[in-house]
Amino acid sequence: MPAYVIVDIDVKDRDGFARYVQEVAPMLSRWGARYLVRGGGVEVLEGEWDHHTVVILEFPSRAVAEEFYASEEYAPLLELRLDSTDSMLAILEGYDAG
């Protein structure tokens, strides 16, 4: 069952984050992930949400998403993202209608 990673990113260092974006995209592809949302406009219809840049990724499974996040391959880019942004990240399990 697919899993979804939702990230709310407040960019503090544009150059560092630009490098992160450039390097992470091919890595995500190798892990079977794909972007569903990559920034763009947000209209809040209910409640208050202090959002910044929202990214939603689809992974083949929660296990793959967790393995990617903890991988040695991603570690340097994770450090770069954490250094260049303030962010919140969550992994959500997909819905299985069956």
Image (cartoon, helix red, strand yellow):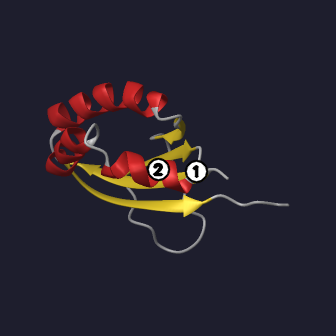
Instruction: Give the answer, above or below, for where 30 lies relative to 5.
Output: above
Numbered tag placed on residue 46 in the rendering = none
Q: Is residue 3 left or right of residue 27?
A: right
SS of the residue at dot 1?
Answer: loop
Q: Amino acid at mark 2?
A: Ala
Residue 52 spot, x, y in % from top left: 36, 53
Instruction: Give the answer, above or below, for where 3 lies relative to 60.
Output: below
Quarter occupied by the C terminus: bottom right
User: Which residue is located at x 58 percent, y 53 percent?
Assistant: 3
**Label pair 2/1, CB-CB below 8 angstroms:** yes
Residue 75 spot, x, y in % from top left: 23, 44
Q: Is 27 or 39 nearer to us in this picture?
A: 27
User: Which residue is located at x 23 percent, y 39 percent?
Assistant: 77
- Cα separation, mark 2 vs mark 1, equals 6 Å
Q: Amino acid at mark 1?
A: Ser
Q: Is 5 or 45 nearer to us in this picture?
A: 5
Q: Is residue 14 left or right of residue 56?
A: left
Residue 14 spot, x, y in % from top left: 19, 36
Residue at which label 1 appears: 61
Mark 1 nearby-residue class (10 Å; few <14, some 14–19, many ≥20): some
State the residue lying farthest toward the bottom: 47
SS of the residue at dot 2?
Answer: helix
User: Which residue is located at x 20 percent, y 51 percent?
Assistant: 82
Residue at which label 2 appears: 65
User: Which residue is located at x 51 percent, y 54 percent?
Assistant: 63
